[in-house]
Amino acid sequence: MEKNTDNRTIALAALFQCVEGVRQIAHDGNVDQALFTTCLQSVVTDNTDTIQDIYGGLEKLQTGFKVLLFQLGSGQMTPDGKQKNMETTRYAINLLHLEKKLDSHPELFEILLNGIEDVQRQLKHFAVTDETIISRLADIYAETISKLGPRIMVKGDQGHLGKKENAAKIRALLLSGIRAALLWRQAGGSRWKLLLERGKMQRTANDFLELIRHG
């Protein structure tokens, strides 16, 4: 993968899309199905020519680009007048940190890869959003990323968070976020890039949204 701003922007948008899914489940008890499918599919997709192919095209990351613009913007309000959600940024930063820690634990990375290969075989019989697949992805997260610590503490409505199926969906989305964080690093992303390219990535995200709107 080329280390350029376009690829870093796509990876960061994908990361924000994953954590937006976590936020939706934690606060609303459900998640946009198209967003959820795109995030989960990215975990089991490989052998692609470009980073956008991993997500099925730029149009599948519209939510991620919009969240990126909101979260990297200097204002405290989103364009539709809502208070900026700092939980989303915290989840994203934590996932970037955990992915970096994973890089120094090859034994856990091997377990993660083997688990994903198992899921790829299961996809011959189940859709990626089937409960069986979601549960397996959640287990992979628990068996690998959760062991790195510190664990990501998801905030929201306890009635939603207490449901087993929602907990599995959140872990599956966090695993998807680790995938996006890995792509971010492979594209040359770092803490410094996040600080120094903030404006540049916002402009790139805007350009991608315009491209999506006008086909």
Image (cartoon, rainbow, N blue to C red):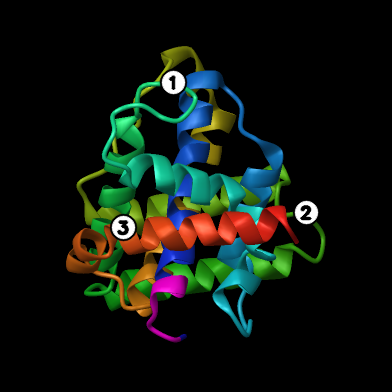
Q: Earlier in the sequence, mark 1 or mark 3?
A: 1
Q: Which amino acid, mark 1?
A: Gly
Under circle 1, the secondary element is loop
The numbered mark at residue 127 is: 2
Residue 77 lies, with reference to residue 131, above or below; the image says above
Q: Residue at x 62, y 64 (%)?
A: 55
Q: Residue at x 34, y 28 (%)?
A: 84
Q: Which amino acid, mark 3?
A: Gly
- Near mark 2 (Cα within 10 A), the count class, few <14, some 14-19 or many ≥20, is some
Q: Marks 2 and 3, how far apart in space?
A: 38 Å
Res 116 → quadrant = bottom right
Q: Is residue 119 left or right of residue 168?
A: right
Under circle 2, the secondary element is loop
Residue 46 lies, with reference to residue 130, above or below; the image says below
What's drawn in magenta, residue-wise?
2-7
Q: Nearer the viewer, mark 1 or mark 2?
A: 1
Residue 59's spot in the image, x, y percent?
Answer: 67, 57
Under circle 3, the secondary element is helix
- What residue is pinned by disc 3? 199
- Look at the numbered discs 2 and 3 and tell me whether their residues touch, using CB distance below 8 Å: no
Q: Is residue 145 left or right of residue 169?
A: left
Residue 172 visible somewhere in the drawing: no
Q: Residue 4 lies in magenta, yes or no? A: yes
The numbered mark at residue 81 is: 1
Q: Residue at x 61, y 56 (%)?
A: 210
Compare residues 215 and 108 and report the one nearer the observer: 215
Residue 28's spot in the image, x, y percent?
Answer: 54, 20
